[in-house]
Amino acid sequence: EIVIDKSSPVSGKKLRDIGLPPGVLVALISREGELHVPFGDTQILPGDTVLLFASSKILPKAVEILGVQ
């Protein structure tokens, strides 16, 4: 699970536009207490909790793209 900060480079972008590596699955987004199954046109917003599935090889790159420190 990754919480998107307002300073994240993906904040406000659509999922299809953030450039996650192949093999990364964004399974759910929790926003204001509601769960959403994301699609390519789902916008990532500050405060969203994003549930990712990825191998240990590509997870660090995904975390870097999402701007998590």
Image (cartoon, rainbow, N blue to C red):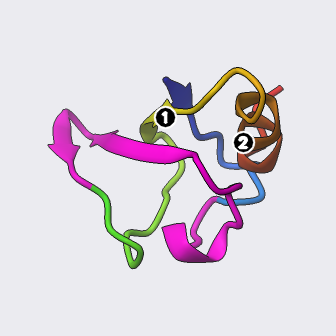
- Residue nearest the viewer, comparing 62 with 68: 62
Task: Look at the numbered disc 1 and give the secondary structure of its residue.
Answer: strand
Residue 68 in the image: state x and y as whole percent: 76, 32
Q: Quadrant of residue 34?
A: top left
The quadrant of the image that shows the C terminus is top right
Q: Residues within 10 Å of mark 2 (few under 14, many from 20)?
A: many
Residue drawn at x 77%, y 58% is 9
Q: Quadrant of residue 18?
A: bottom right
Q: How many labels were placed on the picture?
A: 2
Residue drawn at x 44%, y 42% is 48
Magenta region includes residue 59: no
Q: Are marks 2 and 1 in contact (CB under 8 Å)?
A: yes
Give whichever of discs 2 and 1 has the lower sequence position: 1
Q: Residues within 10 Å of mark 1 (few under 14, many from 20)?
A: some
Residue drawn at x 78%, y 49% is 65
Residue 7 in the image: state x and y as whole percent: 76, 49
Magenta region includes residue 24: yes
Q: Is residue 41 above or below residue 59?
A: below
Q: Is residue 21 left or right of residue 3?
A: right
Q: Which residue type carries mark 2?
A: Ala
Residue drawn at x 21%, y 50% is 36
Q: Which residue type carries mark 1?
A: Leu
- Residue nearest the viewer, comparing 55 with 34: 55
Residue 49 shows in this picture: yes
Magenta region: which residues? 11-37
What residue is shown with label 2?
Answer: 62
Q: Is residue 1 left or right of residue 64?
A: left
Residue 14 shows in this picture: no
The dot on residue 52 is 1
Whole-angstrom CA distance, mark 2 to mark 1, is 9 Å
Q: Is residue 7 above or below residue 58?
A: below
